Amino acid sequence: MDRRRRAVNDQAASHGSWTPEGETLPAVTEEGVIEALKTVFDPEIPVDIYELGLVYAIELEEGGRVKVEMTLTTPSCPSAQELPSMAEEAIRQMPGVTDCQVEIVWDPPWDQSRMSEDARLALNMF
């Protein structure tokens, strides 16, 4: 595909498209939400929140609404206020997202077994 056609397709994907019924928003996918969450890093740990296993659930609703349940490594985590808002902001930047709610949950408690293999390698935790 040439550059011009790719640019037009990329623009349509990020801005929706017009139909006789009105503009349609781009589809929000779980994979897209995961990619957005992978841009959010705990300031104290050089691993993103998804690979750390902090994200418990992603729910896609009609109209571009997204709900995420996540936890923190500990209830006394110094990033307790900023990580959920950082996750919410990353998701809100996605094309097609009209609203986002990130909820902190503590059950089940987080433990190292929730981390991906890549996260364990990055943190030297086997």
Image (cartoon, rainbow, N blue to C red):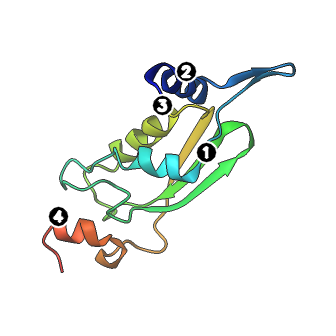
Nearest to the eye among marks 2 and 4: give it.
2
Q: Which residue is mark 4?
A: 122
User: Spatial distance from mark 4 to mark 1, Cα to Cα?
Assistant: 29 Å
29 or 48, nearer to the observer? 29
Q: Amino acid at mark 1?
A: Val
Q: Earlier in the sequence, mark 3 or mark 4?
A: 3
Cβ atoms under marks 3 and 1 closer than 8 Å: no
Rendered location of residue 106, percent (x, y): 45, 67
Q: Give left or right: position of 11 versus 123.
A: right
Amino acid identity at mark 4: Ala
As helix, strand or loop, the secondary structure at mark 4 comes to: helix
* Residue on which disc 1 sits: 66
- Indicate the quadrant where residue 76 lies: bottom left
Residue depicted at 55% across the width and 31% down the height = 95
Q: Nearer the viewer, residue 51 or 99?
A: 51
Q: Residue at x 21, y 47 (%)?
A: 43
Residue identified by numbered label 3: 93
